[in-house]
Amino acid sequence: GADKIWRKGDRMRFKKQTIAVTATLIAALATPVRLAAQQPNLKHTKYKLIDMGTFGGPNSYFFGGPVARNVNNHGTVTGSADTSIPDPYAPNCDTPDCLILRAFVWKDGALTDLGALPGGYSSAAGWANDSGMITGWSENGLIDPLTGRPENIAVVWSRGKITSLGTLGGSFSYSNAMNNRGQIVGLALNGTPDRKSVV
């Protein structure tokens, strides 16, 4: 008798506790829904899609490797765009369509060709700092003796002029990033053969 009564009372207490816990959980889950419904409609950011164009060819690109800064804090955009001129180095081209590629700067609706190093045809840009300097690479008019492809050299464009950053003695360099003081980091070949690659 007493044992059965205790069990019956224990079951009753358990049922009441289960109902209370269930009701609390339902209330807790419903609260965020009510709070979300009570918040005012948030304004959504609107974006405008702008076609920056090309230099007569079909495509434009953003280059930059693992890091890039194609847009600075003043709305200046840099990248590369096809011309309609066939690449004289075909089939050793920098783009799939084998057209001469030129680095550009875009600002306030105007697309400007940044040019290439003397003797070079194609160029590309991948970083614009807040001081108006742009860095990337350019062909220099020479052929890499190891690959048979056009040499690409890191460059910087500043105040309408292009400057080669050179190499460490090899036939290739690449600028990776630049700060607002114009300090540039990247990589360059040094001209020393890699013994591991010599057969």
Image (spheres, rainbow, N blue to C red):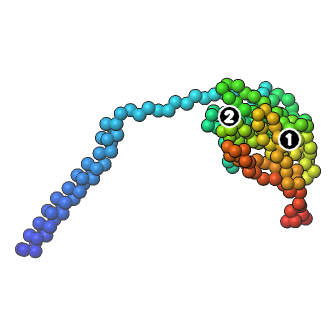
Q: What residue is at 91 percent from the left and 37 percent from the top?
A: 119
- The amino acid marked with disc number 2 is Val
Which of these two is toward me, 138 or 150?
138
Q: Residues within 10 Å of mark 2 (few under 14, many from 20)?
A: many
Q: Which mark is residue 77?
A: 2
Instruction: Decide if residue 168 is in sight here.
Output: yes
Q: What residue is at 91 percent from the left and 53 percent from the top?
A: 146
- The amino acid marked with disc number 1 is Glu
- Secondary structure under tag 2 reads strand
Q: What residue is at 78 percent from the left and 32 percent from the top?
A: 160
Q: Residues within 10 Å of mark 1 (few under 14, many from 20)?
A: many
Give the quarter of the image for residue 16. Answer: bottom left
Note whether 192 is above or below 42 in the view shown: below
Give the quarter of the image for residue 152. Answer: top right
Would residue 136 appear left or right of 45 to someone viewing this image?
right
In which quadrant of the rendered image does the N terminus lie? bottom left
Extreme residue in the front direction: 181
Residues marked 2 and 1 touching at CB (< 8 Å): no
Extreme residue in the left direction: 1
Q: Which mark is residue 139?
A: 1
Give the quarter of the image for residue 54. Answer: top right
Q: Earlier in the sequence, mark 2 or mark 1?
A: 2
Report the Cα–Cα distance between label 2 and label 1.
21 Å
Q: What residue is at 82 percent from the left and 28 percent from the top?
A: 84
